Amino acid sequence: MRTSLFCLLLASAAFSAEMRPWTDAQGNQTQAVLRGFDGGEVLLQNAAGKTLRVPIKNLSADDQSYVVLNITTLVDPSFAAPKVAPAAVGPILTKSSWPATLTAPDGLTNADYVEQKSKPGSHLYRSRRFEYVLNAQEKLNPVVMKEVARVFEGTYEMLSQSPFGVQAQPVDGYFRAQLYQTMQLYHAAGGPMGSGGVYKRDERVFKVPLESLGLKLGTNGYVRDDNFELKTLVHEITHMMMHDILPLLPRWLIEGSAEYVECIPYKSGTFRHSDLLASVRRYNKDRLSGKYRFSGPPLDELQRIIQVPIVRKAGNVYFDWEMPGDGVPMVGFYHSAMLMTYYFMHLDGDGKGTRLLKFLEAVRAEQPKHTAFVKEFEAYRVAMEEFSKKPEVKKLPDGRIEFPSYLKPPPEPTPPHPDYRTERLGYIHIGLLFDGRKEEDLAREAIEALRKVGLEAAR
């Protein structure tokens, strides 16, 4: 016999941004996060991180519609919920395996031009989950715009049904992208030099210049040229979809997971994960070919990128940290990160990515606590700024402050984990992934396993 939803979901003083109210047929409300749908049951996660299975028929009509809109591809086709307009999106529970093939339905990929919000030099488009601002004089050819939207929506669908999952919330109903007519405009908007696209986490926006996509101005707007390529989109969209857990991941897994998804063969709106290994072999061969300055990731490079940062502490000050991957050229770092991600996903242990999935689940459970602490610390920072403005408070050259004993500064919040404010934040749960193995031993295991499937990882 199932306990009712509202007995199982525990109350909490603070919820993360993913929390929303859920209402049963009697009108009772509670707070939880949508995590998935399976066999007629909605998977909800409470603030304590516990995932609960609730029959969808026990939820209100609005909640049933929310489930359908957010995880359409997972919903039992025999279930029909009331139609509602908003295109809201929620995080999705990861699965243990990747879909062999996936094609985003046409209904998701129509990119509509929003006439009333567009103006000369700035054109607004919307697909189901994404909003695109084209910073250019001319519109995109409708066929090309649909191709771009197909990649965005298709990558979302692929990740929603993958072990990585969607770990992000849209802003006002949409994830946002900015497309730029020239590389100069892209750089002026904060795009890094030497990059072909970037996800700006602080802005929650993906930025990309048209020329990186192989688009040129034709007689009917921008059209594809011989260099039309959308892999950059897949890479950065992966970062966007993992937004909420990025601070809690090691740098190599952030980039390695995006490279991994980028390697999934994509053509005409269809991802074919079943052909991934052949694609990864081509990727690996290309980067070992001499085309790039870095000649591939030898053993010590794989070991170096997974090293836990060294952080020294003196009093309350952390200093002199060593970042994993320091000294590895960028192309080599991405290459090594990709191979390590592939190893953990398909070759480590039981070959089912079990250790990696345990690590990701621990990260997801940590994320609400981290979000709450970030908000708490920001409030503390603002309070300290106000405190330092008091006439009795004196700022010292080294950044410290002096004040009379009768003044009490705002208390600094205590982080749930001591590494919340160090470069080791992404390694809090790394023990689940390493499982007692030393970095050098783990790297050697990876090299051996990669070679067995035709991925030469050393020279």
Image (cartoon, rainbow, N blue to C red):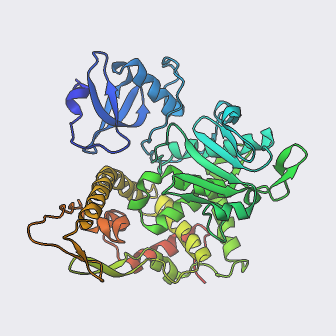
Depicted 281 relative to depicted 291: above or below: above
Whole-percent x, y for residue 230 in the image: 71, 54
Horizontal side, residue 27 vs residue 352: left or right = left
Q: In which quarter of the image is the C terminus?
A: bottom right
Q: In which quarter of the image is the N terminus?
A: top left
Q: Quadrant of residue 379?
A: bottom left
Q: Is 14 or 65 nearer to us in this picture?
A: 14
Depicted 231 relative to depicted 83: above or below: below
Q: Inspect this view and state whether residue 256 appears.
A: yes
Horizontal side, residue 175 vs residue 138: left or right = left
Residue at the spot 57% in from the left edge and 38% down from the top edge: 129
Horizontal side, residue 262 vs residue 220: left or right = left
> Looking at this rendering, what residue extends furthest in the right direction?
219
Q: Quadrant of residue 104?
A: top right
Whole-percent x, y for residue 154 in the image: 62, 43
Whole-percent x, y for residue 52 in the image: 30, 35
Depicted 224 relative to depicted 414: above or below: above
Residue at the spot 64% in from the left edge and 36% down from the top edge: 127
Whole-percent x, y for residue 277 in the image: 62, 59
